[in-house]
Every structure is written in C-alpha cells, then in structure tokens.
Amino acid sequence: MPVTKITIDARTALPFIDALLSCNKEHYLNIEKNRIHVRSVDTGNVFMILAECECITEIPEHAPKRAALDFNLIKKILIHSKDCRITISIDGEKASIDYGRFSAKIPLVDPAFMGKEPNSPTINLDTRFNIPGKYLYDVCRMVSKKGKIRISAENGVAFATAEDGDLNIREVIGTCDKSSHAMSLFSNDYLTDIAKCVKTSQINIDVAIDHPIKISSEQNGCKFVFLMAPRIEAD
C-alpha cells in the first residue's frame, strides 16, 4: 500500500501531542497538504479539542489521509526528540517514526474501538478577552484538581476565581467590553490540563453566562481551540 509521510519539527510536534493528550490518548489524525489536524471529544463529552499544525506532507495516490493513532505511545517514542526533525510514515497497518538515532513502529488503532469524530460546533459566546496563558495557569494551580474555576466579566474587567473548600481567591486576568457580562463555572481537572498547554502563549477566551468556554491559542506552528462545558450546580 502507498505510504503517507509527515515531516515535522519537534518544536511543533511536541506541543501538538501534549494538547491532544489533554483530551484523550487516541485520536484520528487527518492529513492534508502541509497540514495535519484533529477533532476529538473526551469520553465524558465535557471537553473538545480542535488542533492543527504545520508540517510537510507527502501523500501519494491511494495513500492514507486519515489514521487512528495512540498519541500516548508516540509521546513515549519522542522522549529524546528535542531539536530534531521527525518523520512519520503511515501505511494501512502501522506508523513508523524516525528521528536522530531512533526509529520505531507502532500499529494503527482499530477504528472499531474509536468513537465517532465530532463535527466542529457552532457556539455563540458574546464575551471575549485576550490574556497571557500564564494567567489562567496561575489561577488553576492555586486549587486542587477537585476545585472549581469561575470565569466572569463585569464592568469591563475579566476575573478568574479559584474555589476549593474554604479557599476562594480571585485574579484579575484581563479587560473586555464594558457591556460584557459573563459568569460560568468549570471543573479544574479539565481546565488545569488546558492551562498547561497554553501557559507560554497568548490566548483568547470566549465566555458567556452558564455557557461553554472557548480557549484559542497559537504557538510554534500549531493552532488550538479548546471547548469545555460548564459545571452547572444545583441550587
């Protein structure tokens, strides 16, 4: 069977893989001309990621343009790949990965064990602010993964509030339109994983009242969109 080849720098591949692993370990990888992309939702249907990155692709006629891969295995293979150029070759049964002194082969994941690839959602969120990802990372670190993060906007100021038991601490994270109002609560177990992925880049946050949060980031040739459902608490 013809073989699809992806050539990508580690500085692009590693953050791409880390972002995917914040959601699931297995994903469908879609391969296009000089671009790869993934759309995936976690098993609890709480968290979705849309990720793409730049690369060099060679796709002969009848070669695979889509493959189900275990990215946890790929991350282990790439443990020594810093500053390297990586080549991933995919046929109908396996993926071969080569960089530096290392080469590895892993089987493709059986599609029968994969969930359906989600469609890109359309969500109307009326409040947006742009902040350093470090601000989100800092507030997520202040509580345990069992804690909660409340994202709000009022009078032109955006806040993130960390809540965990008796602890309640609020951080000013940005500014927005003075007419914007937002108040949504999110589980920190998901949000802290997202924050780790975006802590070194600028991010756009889109929110509303009791709506999902949308976090967008670009870094090292990658584009990420994270979507997470709010936590609705009973009165």
Image (cartoon, helix red, strand yellow):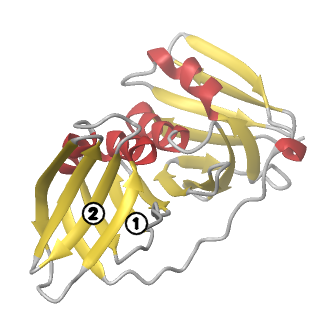
Residues at discs 1 and 2 in contact (Cβ within 8 Å): no
What's the amino acid at mark 2? Ile
Give whichever of 108, 60 is nearer the camera: 108
Residue highlighted by disc 2: 151
Query: Seen in the image, is 108 located left or right of residue 76?
Result: right
Residue 89, by quadrant, is top right
Q: Residue furthest front?
A: 235
Q: How far apart are labels 1 and 2 at the CA level? A: 11 Å
Q: How many marks?
A: 2
First along the sequence among labels 1 and 2: 2
What's the amino acid at mark 1? Lys
Q: Is residue 199 visible?
A: no
Q: Is residue 20 above or below residue 225?
A: above
| Image quarter hosting the N terminus | top right
Residue at coordinates 43% horizontally, 56% vertically from top-left? 224
Residue 98, by quadrant, is top right
Residue highlighted by disc 1: 214
In the rendered image, residue 99, in percent from the top left (x then y), is placed at 53, 21
In the rendered image, residue 7, in percent from the top left (x then y), is placed at 55, 39
